[in-house]
Image: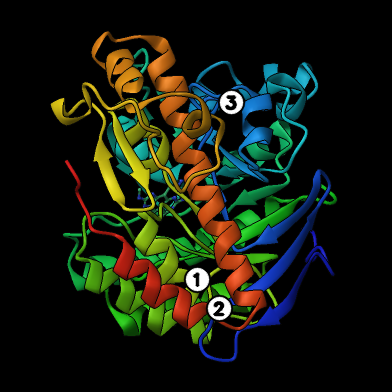
Amino acid sequence: MRGRVSGTFSVIHRDASCGARLGSLKTPHGEIETPIFMPVGTNATVKAMTPEDLWAVHAQIILANTYHLYLRPGHRLVESLGGLHRFMNWSGPILTDSGGFQVFSLGELRKISEEGVKFQSHLDGSYHVLTPELSIKIQEALGADIIMCFDECPAATADYDYVSRSLEMTTRWAKRCKEAHSREGQQLFGIIQGGMHHDLRARSLNEICAIGFDGYALGGLSVGEEKEQMYGVMESCAPLMPQDAPRYIMGIGAPEDLVEAVWHGFDMFDCVMPTRNARNGMLFTSQGRINIKAKAYEEDGGPLDPACGCHVCRTYSRAYLRHLYRAGEILASQLNTYHNLYYYLDLMRRMRGAIRENRFTEFRRDFYGSQTDNHV
Ligand SMILES: CNc1nc2cc3c(=O)[nH]c(N)nc3c(CCN)c2[nH]1
């Protein structure tokens, strides 16, 4: 079992008007300025983006998935070829999720037990057992800078007793993950469960923090709950989490969710929304979301977002982006993804600036005012 990787995270500045804080997280592949958004690169690629594009949109750290890379091409193959960074030509930090959530959202025929999760591959129907120990070994073989404990994310519909028993098993699994983890320099984050119940959240938080990890994540959110429930869990958990460790909310979220979470004092986020929405023509702008396939843009020679400084907004018209999308061109996914990720990462940059200048509460108020949602 490895102790905490000391001195990797420091809080640089706190905005006195709220919970927002500026942080620095050091990893073997570089230093990360927080708050930060992590583009999702499930199969060792952020879909439709080259590593050069990711640097151009100022990505600092990306996420990859244990479940997918274990099934294809296999973690031992990636390890034999020099590890995930070499394999995908991304020299920046990488965080890998532990596989539990993906098994439940993708695998067929899952059976959960104290040992772990038995499941059938969504690719070929083959049978597998993912355990806390195997999840850690896979993530060590991939060589991510930050790895996640193997946990169970209960469905939003799960009842109180199920959520209570589930968090107790997640705590036992977290202990097994810490025991199994031995790769020097690699950070291990614990995951707090407890559903939408503040007493169960506090219990999970205390148990996971008592084990001691390099960072702490809120799991079990963005699973179909109401926004008020999600924000309520953020508000109740943030003050109870260690001040001096990174705080990550998994699977979050829409731009307004990121602003709310930063306001409460969270540091790291990941979500497929910017990349998945891009491929479906749903684009984020300073005036809210737009649907690029709408007829309203057929003859619109203007930029996607006049307030955006990205290459796409400086180069192409809405009419051209609409044409590419309707023609089913591959370039539509590339340009739309490039812009959406630039928007998300620029939003994080603007939030860091607001925290640095102690004006984050004003930033949050102005942000809500600007988002006249669902433009055509
Ligand atoms: C989209 N919503 C969402 N909720 C999550 C919860 C967990 C969660 O509770 N645990 C883990 N390990 N991952 C989660 C993920 C995947 C994050 N890339 C979630 N994604």
In this rendered view, identify the residue nearer to me: 318 or 249.
318
Check disc 3 and report its element: helix, strand or loop.
Answer: loop
Disc sitting over residue 262 in the figure: 1
Does any portion of residue 282 appear in the rendered image? yes
Question: In percent of the image, x 50 and y 31: which residue is there?
Answer: 338
Q: How far apart are marks 2 and 1 (CA)?
A: 5 Å
State whether residue 165 is above or below residue 264. Answer: above
The yes-or-no answer for disc 2 within 8 Å of ligand 1 is no
Tell me whether circle 1 and circle 3 mark residues in contact (CB < 8 Å): no
Q: How far apart are marks 1 and 3 (CA)?
A: 27 Å
In this rendered view, identify the residue nearer to me: 263 or 134.
263
Crowding at label 3, few (<14), some or many (≥20) Cα neighbours within 10 Å? many
Q: Disc 1 marks which amino acid?
A: Val
Q: Residue furthest bottom?
A: 16
Tell me whether circle 2 and circle 3 mark residues in contact (CB < 8 Å): no
Q: Quadrant of the N terminus?
A: bottom right
Disc sitting over residue 296 in the figure: none
Check disc 1 and report its element: helix, strand or loop.
Answer: helix
Q: Disc 3 marks which amino acid?
A: Ala
Could you say which quadrant of the image residue 333 lies in?
A: top left
Provide the residue designation for mark 3: 44
Q: How far apart are marks 2 and 3 (CA)?
A: 31 Å
Q: Using residue 269 as the reference point, say whether residue 133 is left or right of it.
A: right
Q: Disc 2 marks which amino acid?
A: Ala
